[in-house]
Image (cartoon, rainbow, N blue to C red):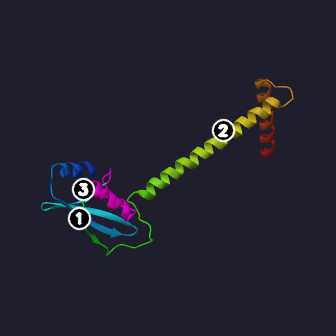
Amino acid sequence: MSTLEKTIDHSTLRRLMSAGAHVGAQIVGQAGSWGVVINYGRASQTLAAARGEPRTFRKFETLARYLKDMSITECTVHLAEFEPGSKAIQPGTEKRRAVASDRLKAAHAAAAHDQWVKESIAASLADPAPNMAHDAVMRKARALIDKKRKQHAG
């Protein structure tokens, strides 16, 4: 959407409407979505989302309902850049999706590791072999390491 540098957020637009300002709208089509430029007096500003980027609507019906709820009943529609059927690309969406995907992958990996630890502990507790003291295990490990070092050295 060819957007204007200045933006207007929902609460500011609502205050303008409550104050009785004469407000018009231009609906601008783009790849798979619709944007809005709000006109009042001599000013024109792009409707912004909460994070500050231009707000877009995937469905024209949703946009029409939004404008009607704001008591904006007349607008112009610009279709030059609209591409039916193509997906809208929201600014920053790819990064947010990648971050969310990484979080989900990490959560699944952590859950799988947790399950593996639980199963390993359960198997160890169920093993009928006699337990061995830590010092005895360490002596055996050191002896094995020393043996392997001598083999590799000679």
* Residue highlighted by disc 3: 71
The answer to whether any part of residue 138 appears in the image is yes
Residue 123 spot, x, y in % from top left: 79, 34
State if disc 3 and disc 1 touch (CB < 8 Å): no
| Residue at horizontal 37 percent and vertical 63 percent from the top | 61
What amino acid does circle 2 point to?
Asp
Asked whether 13 or 74 is in front, the reply is 74
Q: Residue furthest left?
A: 42
Reply above or below: 109 against 23: above
Residue 112 spot, x, y in % from top left: 66, 43
Q: Residue furthest right?
A: 129
The answer to whether any part of residue 141 appears in the image is no
* Residue highlighted by disc 1: 74
What amino acid does circle 1 point to?
Glu
* Secondary structure found at label 3: loop
Task: Indicate whether residue 51 is drawn in magenta.
Answer: yes
* Residue highlighted by disc 2: 114
Mark 2: give few (<14), some (14-19) or many (20+) Cα within 10 Å: few
Q: Nearer the viewer, mark 2 or mark 1?
A: 1
Left/right of residue 151 with respect to residue 9 in the rendered view: right
Asked whether 82 or 102 is in front, the reply is 82
| Residue range corresponding to the magenta coloring | 49-71
Residue 83 spot, x, y in % from top left: 39, 73
